[in-house]
Structures are given as C-alpha cells and as structure tokens.
Amino acid sequence: MSAVGKFFDPSTSRGKAALGAIVLVVAAAGYHALQPAASKRAPEVTVPVSVEKVTRQDVPVMRVGYGTVRAFNSVVLKVRVDGALQKILFKEGQDVNEGDVLAQIDPRPYQAALNQALAKKSQDEAQLAKARNDLKRFTTLNASQFASQQSLETQQTNVAALEATVKSDEAAVENARVQLGYTTITAPVSGRIGLRQADVGNIMRAADQVGLAVISTVHPISAIFSLPASELPTLTRAGFAKPMPVYAYTSDDREKLAEGELLTVDSAVDETSGSVKLKATFQNADNRLWPGQSISAHLLVTTTKDALTVPANAVQRGPTGLFLYVVDTNNKAVVRPVETTETFGTSVIVVSADIKEGDMVVTTGQSRLQPGSKVSIHADKGAEAKAEGKAGEKTDAKAGER
C-alpha cells in the first residue's frame, strides 16, 4: 500500500482523523453556499443631509462700501464783532431753527457808534439843505447879472460835495447798524447745536478760531462711502438719472439703520486707493445716524428679475471650480458644476445648464458625500425656523386685519 493510501486508511487512527477533517470542511462549505447572496455584500452607507429647493426670484444687485456719516450742513457759530459775551440763550444738544437767537454780545459800544453816525449824518444834511438854498439864490442873482458865473459854479460844487458827504454818512450809518446787529448771534442754519465753547462774561473776538459751538444739520444727514473704481462701469450702466437706494447698516452689517438715496459720485478717482467716493442722504427721522459714525453702505444698483438662485451654503469649491450636489429621484447625490454672479443675503444667483428650478440641492453634509452617494434627507433647522417665522408673520397680519 502506498504512503497516501496509508494516510487515508480508515482502519488507522491517522486515516480516521483525516477523514473527519475532510467532512468538516465540506460541511462548512455547504453551509456558506446555502446562505443568501445579500448577506455577502457590505451594507450601503446612507449619508444624512439637509436640502433646499432651487428657486427663481427677483434679486437686488448690491454694492457695499464702508464710510462715515457726515452732517448735511456743519456751521461753526462764531462772533463777528469784539465784545463781552452777555447772554447764552441755547442749551447744549438743543435743536434750533434758522434765525433763532442764540447769544448776545454787549451792544452798547456799537449802539453808541450808530448814534454818532446818525448825528453826523443829520449835521451834514443840515449843511446840504443850506447849501441848496444858497444855490437857488445864486442862480437867481446870476440871471439878473448880480452874481458872477464863478460864484454860481462854486456854490454848485459846494452842494455836490455836501451831497457826497451825506451819502458817505448813510453808508457809515448802515455799517454801524450792521455791526450792532452782529452783537445778536442767530442760528445761520437749522440743526442740532453741540457743546458750547465759551461762558457768559468772556471777551469774544472776531479773530478767534474757536467759536461758541457747532450747529450740525442731521435732518437730513449724509454719508460718504467708497467703492472700487472698477464699479464705475456698473454704476454708469445703471444710470445716475434715477435715484439709487442706499441702505445704511452698522459697520458689522448686522443691523439696518436707515434708508436713503445716492446724491452724487465724486468727480475723480483717488489714485492712492483706487476708489471713488459716493455721497448719500438719509432723512434720519429717528436719529439713528450720527455725524462721525462708521457705517456699511449698501447701494442698490439694479434688480435682476426672475433669477435662478440657490442657498449660498450649497455651493462648494473644487479643483475644477464651483459645484454643488443635487439629490436625484433615487435619493442619490449628483455633482453639478455651477457659476455664480451675485450674492445677496444667504443666497446666490447661479448660471448653469444643469440646474433648474425645483431641484433639491444639498446645504449641509457635503463633506461626507461622493458622486452617487445614497442620502437621507433631514430637516434643515434654519429653513424650518425661517418658514415658521414667515407663517407667524402672516398669522399676525390676519389677526390684525380682524
């Protein structure tokens, strides 16, 4: 008998062990062969994601620049004559109207100067009246050959000189009145008056650089902000003939403060910064804007009608450009390349032949996705809260109508 025959000989102990091992292997193979085919495949991974629909809507095209609020008019309240400050008739922070009396300089020296000028004028007018009567007599005597032509001409010259003197006196009187009027200080413009810089009893001089206070017009108020010079073609295409709305936000863009309109664009580009300055005006009825305040100005250039939009957080950047995931009818993620033009709020305008209105795009969970991944859609908490807020607004509006 051969060595192999001896090994598998069931009459020997070695043969019995080998035979038992073969039976176990065959049994195991048969068991696995009877198992369902599905149990051999690895379970497919489902990725939880949030989605939102692609929509069409009118999109405002904004340009944002940072700037500073300025008073529409700012006037330093200064004295125009020298003298002691007798009265202050305003309170700091008070709103004043044009023509309101705000302060009083001691008027007595200027009243005295006016009286003196009036007296001089009266004196010269009396002399002029006498000279005119003398001229009448000389004219009559000259016609009768009782006065020489030279005497008549001398008297005519005397009358003309006195008439000029009276006119000079009238000018002096008017000047004295103006100087006296300057002792009463009135508001040159309407606005809010700031902190006063002098107290009653101080000697004020017209040459002083510091005035009594500053009056700032804050109704309306203006703001100066800058945009890159590259935006000028966009502004030009939009046209300056119609007013462009401007929205003033806090410098961190969190809160809207006021709505106004563009007043003008500066006539030159700043060569140092490559930007151009723009000026906007706001009615500021609620005083939310203040001179010197930093703001973020949002200029509405135009509105794109019926634009295709997706949530901004749906757009991803890859090696070949921008893309997003669209969930198909089989709940699988499909990659779609996109191009974007404008951003507004939490959405962007997209331009793509592979995206259409109503498509469901993934807004969260993209990091775990691959093309063809199976997805399970979870509710977007932010979208739900937004929808609930809008529903609440409609309910409140209906309740108010009732």
Image: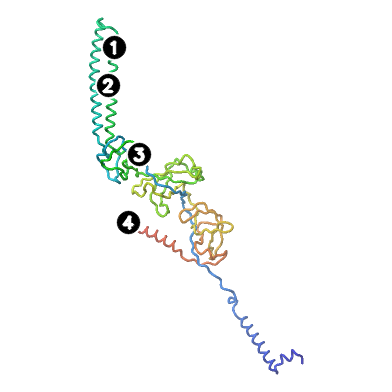
Element carrying mark 2: helix
Structural distance between the alpha carbons of marks 4 and 3: 58 Å
What is the C-alpha distance between the residues marked 2 and 4?
77 Å
Q: Provide the residue designation for mark 4.
A: 400
Residue reaching furthest to the right: 1
In front: mark 3 or mark 1?
3
- CB within 8 Å, label 3 to label 1: no
> Mark 1 belongs to which amino acid?
Thr
On the image, the x and y values in percent for residue 175 come to 29, 28
Q: CA distance from mark 4 to mark 1?
A: 94 Å
- Residue 257 image offset from top left, x and y in percent: 38, 51
Camera-nearest label, 4 or 3: 3
Q: Does label 4 or label 1 sit earlier along the sequence?
A: 1
Q: Which mark is residue 154?
A: 1
Question: What SS does tag 4 mark?
Answer: helix
Q: Nearer the viewer, mark 2 or mark 4?
A: 2
For residue 209, the mark is 3
Q: Secondary structure at mark 1?
A: helix
Spatial distance from mark 3 to mark 2, Cα to Cα? Answer: 37 Å
**Which residue sits at x=29%, y=8%?**
150
- Where's residue 112, x and y in %? 23, 30
Q: Nearer the viewer, residue 299 or 203?
A: 203
At horizontal 74% and vertical 90% (from top left) the residue drawn is: 5
Label located before the other in sequence (4 or 3): 3
Identity, as a three-letter code, of the amino acid under mark 4: Gly
Residue at image coords 34%, 58% = 396
Residue position for label 2 = 166
Instruction: Look at the numbered disc 3 and give the secondary structure of its residue.
Output: loop
